[in-house]
Structures are given as structure tokens and as C-alpha cells.
């Protein structure tokens, strides 16, 4: 199969006009994925989507109107929400402190391993990298809080 034929289905989500995806095979067996059905080829429908209705701005108003909040949905007071946010921040702060300790322990274990073979050091390096990614994620999450 030709590489450009494989890439076509990957690019179709980028097109805004295509609403139907066809898989067409010609008489020589060449497969083509397209949004235009031709009579010269054996075509079958792979997917069909309805056009997206245009909305103003970023589309949140249209989405909100389509899924209104039920009248019996529980409401939270401003003070209760602030308390929940405060609890969340405290939990994230504690997790961050634990991850920072874990990073230090993992780095110490790596330095204590000394001149071990690479295959013995790699799991230790992976552990350090994991904890460092966790620290970055927690910092990002804390930064997203109000």
C-alpha cells in the first residue's frame, strides 16, 4: 500500500467539509480513502458525520444550551466551594512535598549505585524521571487553581 494512502484517513479530521468517508477499490485492487464517491470504483461508506452547526465564539454557549443543568442539581455555596478548593490545595501541596522527597531519595539511590553497569542504573534513572514528571504535573495543577 502506498504511504500517501495511509496518511489520507489521518488528515480527514482536519477537513471541515467532509461528512462521509468512503473506502474505494478500483479494478486493479488499489484502495483509496476519500470523501467523494465515484461510480468507476467500488466504494463503501466507512463513516458518516453530520455537519457541525456554526456557533459564536468558542462554541461553549451552544454546548451549554444543548445540555442544561437539571433543576434539581445540587448547588454549592461560595463558602463551601472555597473550603473545597482549600482542601484540594492542601492535598496537592502534601502530594508535592511527598514527590519532592521521593525525587531526593531516588537521586540518592542513583548516586549510591556508583559505577554500576548501564542496565542496572536505568531503572534508577527511570524512577528519578518519573518523580520529576510527577513534581512538574503537581506544580502545573497547583498553578491552575484559583
Image (cartoon, rainbow, N blue to C red):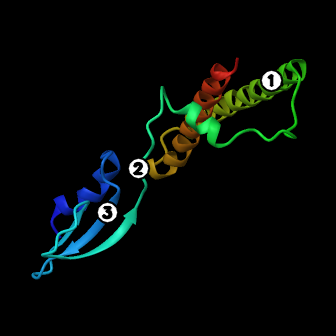
Residue lying at 60% horizontally and 25% vertically, measured from the top left: 140
- Which quadrant of the figure has residue 66? top right
Crowd around label 1: few <14 · some 14–19 · many ≥20 (10 Å): some
Mark 2 burial class by Cα count in 10 Å: few <14, some 14-19, many 20+:
few
Question: Which percent across, then down, holds residue 48?
Answer: 40, 62
Residue 4: quadrant of the picture: bottom left
The crowding category of the residue bearing disc 3, from other C-alpha atoms within 10 Å (few below 14, some 14 to 19, many at least 20), is many
* Residue, disc 3: 21
Q: Is residue 53 left or right of residue 61?
A: left
33 to the left or right of 133: left
* Residue that carries the numbered disc 1 in the rendered image: 85
* Placement of the N terminus among the 4 image quadrants: bottom left
Pointer 2: what residue?
51
Work out whether residue 109 can be spotted: no
Check disc 3 and report its element: helix, strand or loop. strand
- Residue under the point 16% across and 76% down: 41
Amino acid at each position: 500500500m502506498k504511504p500517501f494512502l495511509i496518511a489520507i484517513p489521518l488528515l480527514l479530521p482536519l477537513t471541515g467539509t467532509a461528512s462521509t468517508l468512503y473506502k474505494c477499490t478500483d479494478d486493479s485492487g488499489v484502495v483509496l480513502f476519500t470523501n467523494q464517491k465515484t461510480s468507476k470504483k467500488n466504494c463503501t461508506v466507512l463513516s458518516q458525520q453530520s455537519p457541525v452547526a456554526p456557533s459564536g465564539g468558542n462554541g461553549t454557549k451552544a454546548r451549554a444550551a444543548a445540555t442544561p443543568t437539571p433543576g434539581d442539581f445540587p448547588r454549592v455555596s461560595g463558602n463551601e466551594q472555597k473550603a473545597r478548593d482549600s482542601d484540594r490545595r492542601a492535598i496537592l501541596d502534601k502530594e508535592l512535598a511527598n514527590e519532592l522527597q521521593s525525587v531526593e531519595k531516588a537521586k540518592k539511590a542513583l548516586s549510591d549505585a556508583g559505577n554500576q553497569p548501564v542496565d542496572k542504573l536505568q531503572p534508577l534513572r527511570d524512577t528519578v524521571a518519573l518523580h520529576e514528571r510527577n513534581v512538574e504535573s503537581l506544580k502545573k495543577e497547583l498553578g491552575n487553581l484559583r
